[in-house]
Amino acid sequence: MSQPSTPAPGASRPAGPRPGGNSGSPWAAGGTVFAGVLLFVDGVLGVLKGIAGIASNDVYTSINDYVFKFSVTSWGWIHLVLGVILILVGWGILKGAAWARGTGIVLASLNLIANFMWLPYTPVWAIVTIAIDVFVIWALCTDRSAPGDPVRSS
C-alpha cells in the first residue's frame, strides 16, 4: 500500500519555504518594483524642481533667517543632480541591477535629508517626498529576493 502524497486535513506542514518559492515578503518584493518606479518618478520631478530653481529665483518662496539657507539657484542644482542620479538608480532597480538596491537606499536617504532641509521652501511637496523616500528605503531594505533578479511578473 502506498501512502498518500498530500497531508491529511489538519496535519501540520513543514516550517520551511516552499520549493522554488521566495522566503521574502510578497509586499516587499512588489514594493521593490514600486520603489524603482517611485525613485524614477521622484528623479524626474527633482529634475523639474531643479530646473525651476535654476531658471528663476522667484519660483520658490524666499526665506530670510533659516539655518540651511542657500540661494534658490544652489537648491536648484542640488535637486537637479540628485534627480538625474535618482532616475538612473530607479531604472537600475527596475532592470534588476545588483548595485541599484544599495545605491537606492543611500540616495533615497540623501534625498530625504535634502527635502527636510528644503521644507520651508515647499512644505507640502517636501513632506510628500520625504514619505515617498521612507517607503523606498523600507521596500529596498526588506526585499529578500536575489539582487540580480529582473522585475518579477508574478
Image (cartoon, rainbow, N blue to C red):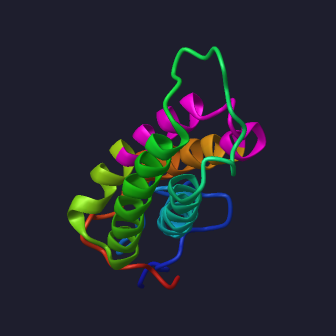
Q: Residue at x 52, y 68 (%)?
A: 44
Q: Is residue 15 visible?
A: no
How would you classify the magenta stretch by its main secondary structure?
Answer: helix
Confirm whether residue 24 shows in the render: yes
Residue 109 counted in the magenta span = yes
Taking 23 as reference, is 5 above or below it?
below
* Residue 101 rendering spot, x and y as whole percentages: 32, 56
Looking at the image, residue 44 lies above or below residue 56? below
In the image, taking residue 92 as reference, residue 61 lies left or right, namely right
Give the extent of the magenta segment: 107-127
Depth order, front residue of 146/123 = 123
On the image, the x and y values in percent for residue 59 come to 69, 51
Tell which of 118 and 26 is nearer to you.
118
Q: Where on the picture, by quarter, is residue 17?
A: bottom left
- Residue name at image x 41 percent, y 39 percent: 110
Taking the spot 50% from the left edge, 55% from the top edge, the residue there is: 54
Seen in the picture, residue 56 relative to 127 is either above or below; the reply is below
